[in-house]
Amino acid sequence: RVPEAHELSEQDGQIVVGARVSLSQLEHFCRERIPEFSRLMRIFASPQIKNKGTLVGNIANASPIADTLPFLYVADAEVELLSLRGTRRVNINQFYTGYKQLDMAPDELISRVVIPVPGQSELLRLYKVSNRKDLDISTFTAAIRLKLTGQRIAAACIAYGGVGPTVMRLPQTEAFLQGQALEAGVFARAGEIARSEIKPISDVRASADYRLQLAENILLKFYAELGETVSEPALS
Ligand SMILES: Cc1cc2nc3c(=O)[nH]c(=O)nc-3n(C[C@H](O)[C@H](O)[C@H](O)COP(=O)(O)OP(=O)(O)OC[C@H]3O[C@@H](n4cnc5c(N)ncnc54)[C@H](O)[C@@H]3O)c2cc1C
């Protein structure tokens, strides 16, 4: 009755994911198109859960540690909402208004998600920190996306999960990184700023202090791993 719910397509640089598309289907579809997102989905839950579970369910469940959300934030994905009144789209960065609070009316459902595909030359890294690698709930999640101009950062998008009531963008860290060179000291300072932008809580999975340390260290890890993907002259 909602034909678009089964859609899984790529058009004009955007991937459209219907509400009934399983995470396994999406993982396979993104393997060549957004390899980093596909890689993250490999360590999401288990194959059995991914064969049934959906991206839209992960979004609507509204957990601040939902594994797909940091990527959707930095990709500027849009959620399409359907009701008898028609359809509307909401940028995922504005979709959550508080813990488990959504900009979704009682008569609406999510029909599709539209994901702009990051450019080939951009740097995208997604992180899931959990006690166990497989089939474990995340303690902390992160997405870091950089656009480069030559050896400088033209734009930075950073989203963290598990550090507040919703997944959060880090506007001060993003603003600091813009225009900077790819240097160790830059990412060390960015980590300090990131730490100052969040107020995580302690819970059964980790202490607030541990999450603060992760918020800082993940940017150092990002820099340390750059050497594997960026040519040497861009790194100093
Ligand atoms: C053992 C186990 C392991 C898990 N591991 C992970 C993990 O590693 N990472 C992770 O992020 N999550 C994990 N999860 C959570 C869950 O599997 C995911 O959130 C999954 O994506 C949910 O998808 P679903 O289609 O089953 O949603 P459902 O469970 O069916 O729905 C979730 C919520 O979304 C609402 N909803 C569903 N579809 C729509 C729609 N179209 N419009 C509006 N609302 C809708 C439902 O009413 C419900 O409130 C795990 C769960 C289990 C049980």
Image (cartoon, helix red, strand yellow):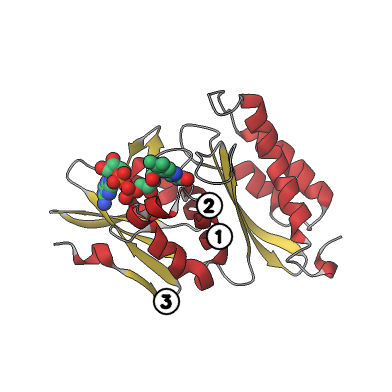
Q: Is 124 left or right of 223, judged from the image as shown?
A: left
Q: State the residue lying farthest toward the bottom.
A: 12
Q: Earlier in the sequence, mark 3 or mark 1?
A: 3
Q: Which of 187 and 29 is in front in this view?
A: 29
Q: Which residue is drawn at 83% across and 47% down?
A: 185
Whole-number angstrom distance, CA of label 3 to CA of label 1: 23 Å
- Name the residue beneath numbered marker 3: 12
Ligand 1 rendered quadrant: top left
Question: Does residue 58 appear in this view?
Answer: no
Within 10 Å of the Cα at label 2, are there few (<14), some (14-19), or many (20+) other Cα atoms?
A: some
Q: Is 165 left or right of 87, judged from the image as shown?
A: right
- Name the residue beneath numbered marker 2: 43
Q: Where residue 65 sits in the image (x, y, percent)?
A: 48, 39
User: Marks 3 and 1: CB-CB under 8 Å?
Assistant: no
* Mark 3 vs mark 1: in front: 1
Up-down: is 202 above or below 140?
above
The response on whether ligand 1 sits within 8 Å of label 2 is yes
Q: Nearer the viewer, residue 134 or 69?
A: 134
Q: Which residue is drawn at 60% across and 72% down?
A: 120
Q: Residue at x 48, y 67 (%)?
A: 30
Q: Where residue 166 sits in the image (x, y, percent)?
A: 46, 37
